Image (spheres, helix red, strand yellow):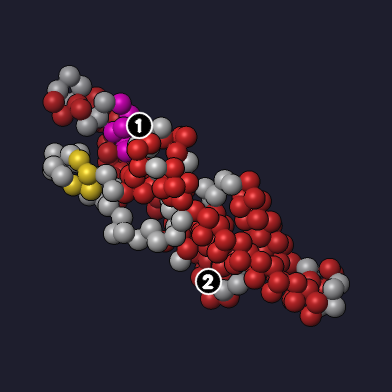
Amino acid sequence: MLTFFEPPTWCRDASDLQIVATSRGDDIINEFGDCKILFEAFGVTADMEENKALYPNFDAMLLTISQSRSIEIGCVGFIAMYMLLQFGDDGFFPSFFFYRGYKRWIRASQCVILIMLLLSILIGNTTFNPFLRMAILGTFLRGFQRELLTLIKMIPDVLYVLSMLGIIVLFYAWFGVVMFVDSPQGRTFPNLLEGMWTLWISVTTA
């Protein structure tokens, strides 16, 4: 949930984007990075619509960077205390806490992800934190783990279908590059990779 209300990581650092209007004041930059300025920007969109929000966001950015960091530190501390209590319930014996088999993998994953979250907060690079949050949540949800294991078991069967689809996309992309060379349609198939990408979009989303 924190990801929906905090400033996105891609627009936090003003020094990376170099587009901050200094007349807006340092407080806005320090609290939201470039995000507040970008999300309030209006202009002409790619489809030539004027006076439109360039970064639609539904005003969902309710937290500042410092508030988001404080909440995340609190959540990491809560999870760490919960795991410490589990460790105590196992008599503070690592052999019981990291019991062999499935339990060992889950507990080890929880410790590694928790350390990575803490380091990312301390360093200030939170790019992968949304993914780490979902990962550590998944280690506590038995239902999610069962569904994930089922999905992993299905991968070999799905790979056969996807490989056939990939061969078909590759063939028709090559066909389009050869057939539409020096023609208006050739803009869609300028080379093999872009032709495959165009066909993949057509198959999956268009």
Residue 37 percent location from the top left of the image: 34, 45
Residue in the foreground of this view, choosing between 157 and 194: 194
Q: Nearer the viewer, mark 1 or mark 2?
A: 2
Residue at x-position 53% and y-position 76%: 143
Q: Is residue 148 visible?
A: yes
Q: Is residue 41 left or right of residue 122?
A: left
Look at label 2 and name its amino acid.
Phe
Q: Is residue 70 left or right of residue 102?
A: left
Query: Which comes before the other along the chain, label 1 or label 2?
Result: 2
Which residue in the structure is indicated by mark 1? 193
Compared to residue 53, the image places residue 145 above or below, namely below
Question: Where does the magenta region start and end?
Answer: 191-197
Q: Is residue 32 magenta?
A: no
Residue 57 percent location from the top left of the image: 31, 55
Residue furthest out toward the top: 182
Which numbered disc covers residue 144? 2
Compared to residue 4, the image places residue 91 above or below, namely below
Q: Quadrant of the N terminus?
A: bottom left
Residue furthest out toward the bottom: 89
Residue 178 percent location from the top left of the image: 24, 24
Estimate how packed mark 1 is, as few (under 14), some (14 to 19) or many (20 or more) residues with alpha carbons within 10 Å.
some
Look at label 1 and name its amino acid.
Leu
